[in-house]
């Protein structure tokens, strides 16, 4: 992650914005030597918002914990089993 002063960011804003958007780089902008602003891509911001929203959803967190526990205990399905179930559901829907 690059760190630039506010003055430098101002003079390089087009180049920095292009890189942040295309390469998903993060650029910290400092003011008076202290971190002040972070430049991130919209895609990365949206991902962070989704993660935050998910972390605030008790039901979703419970589902994630259950999935983690199931995986750790080996309570999973093979690719073959998943494909078979999908095929059964598709044939019923048709």
Image (cartoon, grey):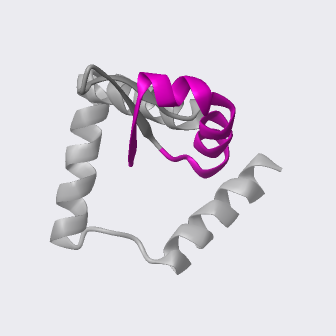
| Residue 46 relative to residue 60: left or right | right
Q: Please report the bounds of the magenta region as a residue range.
A: 1-25
**Residue in front for this viewpoint, 49 or 64:** 49
**Residue in front for this viewpoint, 58 or 47:** 47
Looking at this rendering, what residue extends furthest in the right direction?
94
Q: Position of residue 81 (x, y in %)?
A: 50, 74
| Residue 46 relative to residue 93: left or right | left
User: Does the stretch in magenta take in 62?
Assistant: no
**Residue in front for this viewpoint, 24 or 52:** 24
Q: How many marks?
A: 0
User: Does the stretch in magenta take in 7?
Assistant: yes
Question: Which quadrant of the figure has residue 58?
Answer: top left
Q: Position of residue 83 (x, y in %)?
A: 61, 71
| Residue 63 relative to residue 10: left or right | left
Q: Position of residue 54 (x, y in %)?
A: 35, 29
Q: Is residue 25 above or below residue 11?
A: below
Q: Is residue 66 above or below residue 16?
A: below
Q: Is residue 1 above or below residue 10?
A: below
Q: Residue at x 25, y 68 (%)?
A: 75
Q: Residue at x 68, y 40 (%)?
A: 18
Q: Residue at x 58, y 41 (%)?
A: 20
Q: Position of residue 79 (x, y in %)?
A: 52, 76
Q: Residue at x 16, y 69 (%)?
A: 73
Main SS class of the magenta portion in the image: helix
């Amino acid at each position: 992650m690059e760190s630039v002063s506010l003055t430098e960011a101002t003079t390089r804003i087009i180049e920095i914005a292009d890189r942040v958007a295309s390469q998903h780089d993060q650029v910290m902008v400092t003011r008076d030597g202290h971190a002040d602003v972070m430049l991130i891509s919209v895609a990365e911001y949206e991902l962070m918002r989704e993660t935050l929203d998910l972390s605030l959803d008790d039901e979703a967190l419970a589902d994630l914990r259950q999935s983690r526990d199931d995986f750790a205990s080996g309570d999973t399905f093979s690719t073959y089993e998943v494909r078979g179930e999908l095929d059964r559901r598709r044939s019923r829907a048709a």
